[in-house]
Amino acid sequence: MHAWYPAALRGISRFGTALVCAALALVATTTRAATLDAALLPKIEAATFEVVQAKPANDPLSYEKPLPLDLLPYQERTDKYHSIGTAFAIGNGRYVTAGHVLLAGLDSLWGPPALRDGAGHVYPIAKVEKFALRRDFVVFTLATPPASGATLALDPRPQPNTTVYAVGNALGTGIVIRDGLYTSDTPEPQDGAWKWLRFSAAASPGNSGGPLLDQQGKVVGVVLMKSANENLNYALPIGELLNAPADTARMSARGSYQLDLFTAVSNGNLDAHFALPLDLAAFYREFGARFSAYSEKQFQSLLAHESANLFPNGAGSRRLLYQQTILNSFPSLIVRGSDGEWGLSNTGSQYFALDHNGYVRIGEAGRNGLVHLRRPDDIPAAKFYADAQTRMDLLARTGLFQRMVAGQKIKITSLGKPIRSATHRDRWQRPWQIDAWALPYANRMVLAYTLPVPDGSVMLMRFLPPTEWHDSRLDLDEMSSFVYATYAGTLAQWREFLADPALLPAVMHDIHLDYTYGQRFGYRSPRLTFSYPSSLQTVAPDNLLWLGFRFFLDGGKPTWDAGIVNVWKNTANDDQYEVNVQRHMAPPAGLDTNIDSLWRKIAAREYPYNAVANPQNGQMGIDGVAGAPGVATPTVLYTAFYGATGAPPQAEMKTKLDVLTKDLQVREH
């Protein structure tokens, strides 16, 4: 995720409305009644405007009950616009607001920013004439200017310790004027390129882009932000705006990029510009293209800097590459800890039951959601895998999506059809379906990366504002390669899954599952072949097959392949009949005591890998070891395990193990 903002704004909150930025507390400053000459007020009011965006005309969402919109305050209920900031007229048909207020319209699900006067007339923006990202201002024209033609005079040389007035659309309820003192100047923190005006006049969400006036009603600054550490507000001196290059958009900012995989950050400077004037749509295109290019540069710089220690590279990856295969129905992210070791995120999950044996598990990993969705039996596999809305509607049944209206949480039962769809194959050639849904009421999107698995799907999800679409795609494209997911399902589910080649990761094209109910189960890959008859363990549609894919080194090259084949007689927790064939690798010397000990026992056929039955957690189990024939010092061995409920005798268990290993052939060493 790309975290950027001008260095001058670090540690400072910008005054957008709660609909654009996080809501800010009102400034705790005692204010006096405004002492502006009453004759100036009509002109100030005529030259100051709300910045608004049109509310979406249509709502694609479905709800558990009608929204209680009648309980909203009258203005909020009847207003067709969201109020997001303030703007003012400076003459020659030009208007000013904060840069971040204008950027609220970039890729927005709401209408483009426009100005609204006190009488409710709305004026579309025509052309952008000046813009500075770091100084956070924009100068623009209107398609049809107001008839009044009122403008505010400018004073680029204000005097400290004088009364000033913050004029703005406080809290989105219309233009108000509040007074205080222009207390001091403070250098912007990056390199002191200019000084902010600090003032004590109260300002609230919605004041962004409004004028800061002196006692003569002249503009001395553009109200932008509030200090996080003191009850003072900040304005850009109007002289900075006047002296900025004409007909130019300056994109200068210091930013950082970080992935939810490790704590390392890539820092860099954005320095770009393009010619103005441009109409608003063209401005957004030019800005978006340059910012996306900057994001990609920072992203690539971060990956390049971390490449030597980016999983599966580096010493910190070795434990995960050599430890036993982990079976888990809930996905994990592979993340790097503060000790430099890569491991699986210990993400807890919430369980939600669905009808017809379906369920949803939801957890968190950084700023992302992880989901395992088990397909209900009454939904055909073809429909489930092909229809993103069907999957998301199932997820909505958990109550994950809610809309707050008049203090009530209303459950969203459907997000409708996705507004964007694409596909992506990660580094390991696993196919991900990418879908995005709009939440127009909040100007947010739901982005889901969905990996088909035999019993349903695994999802990597994120809620984001539309402006973060490009960065989030960069993030999740990369992070999808770090998802650790087990492929599991009943044999009936596997049969439906394997029927559609588009659902399969590339490695599955070299793995062949061959089973006939009531007769035999067979597994064949370039690494391993084995089969067993139904007399060993009944082969039936409700057998639960876990194919534990994992990451490991093969000839020094990282790969993702099956590390365990585990077949349970059925899905009942109290039925302990199981067949398990698992891959093990000789670890490098001194890697880890536990991993070294496990390999030594397997290689030496020591207990419990000595074909002697032993009780294990209420189950009787027996292990044997197999390797490629004729290899004196193998680097790869397989264990074959048979487990049963109760306490069968050794002779019976050994017979079962012999049946399992009779046709087992290891093809690698």
Image: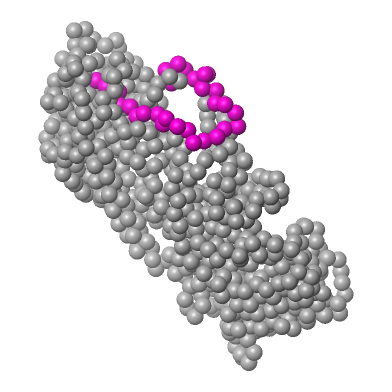
Judging depth in this view, the residue of 341 and 508 nearest the camera is: 508
**Vertical arrangement, residue 9 with respect to residue 651, above or below:** above
Residue that protrudes farthest toward the top in the picture: 38
**Vertical arrangement, residue 301 with respect to residue 516, above or below:** above
Residue 639, percent from left and from top: 68, 77
Left or right, 313 with reference to 301: right
Q: Is residue 99 magenta?
A: no
* Quadrant in the picture for the C terminus: bottom right
Q: Going 43% across and 57% down the picture, which residue do you hit?
A: 477
> Where is residue 478, by image quadrant?
bottom left
Q: Which residues are magenta?
A: 48-76
> Where is residue 626, by image quadrant?
bottom right
> Where is residue 637, by image quadrant?
bottom right
Residue 574, percent from left and from top: 80, 58
Q: Going 56% across and 75% down the picture, which residue do you hit?
A: 510
Judging depth in this view, the residue of 40 and 286 nearest the camera is: 286
**Vertical arrangement, residue 433 with respect to residue 63, above or below:** below
Residue 196 seen = no
**Colour scheme used in the picture?**
one colour
Count of numbered badges drawn on the protein: 0
Residue 231, percent from left and from top: 34, 25
Q: Is residue 59 magenta?
A: yes
Left or right, 277 with reference to 460: left
Residue 553, percent from left and from top: 51, 75
Left or right, 334 with reference to 360: left
Judging depth in this view, the residue of 590 and 2 nearest the camera is: 2
**Vertical arrangement, residue 632 with respect to residue 181, above or below:** below
Residue 113 seen = yes
Q: Going 45% across and 16% down the picture, which residue do you hit?
A: 74
Q: Going 56% across and 58% down the picture, which residue do you hit?
A: 452
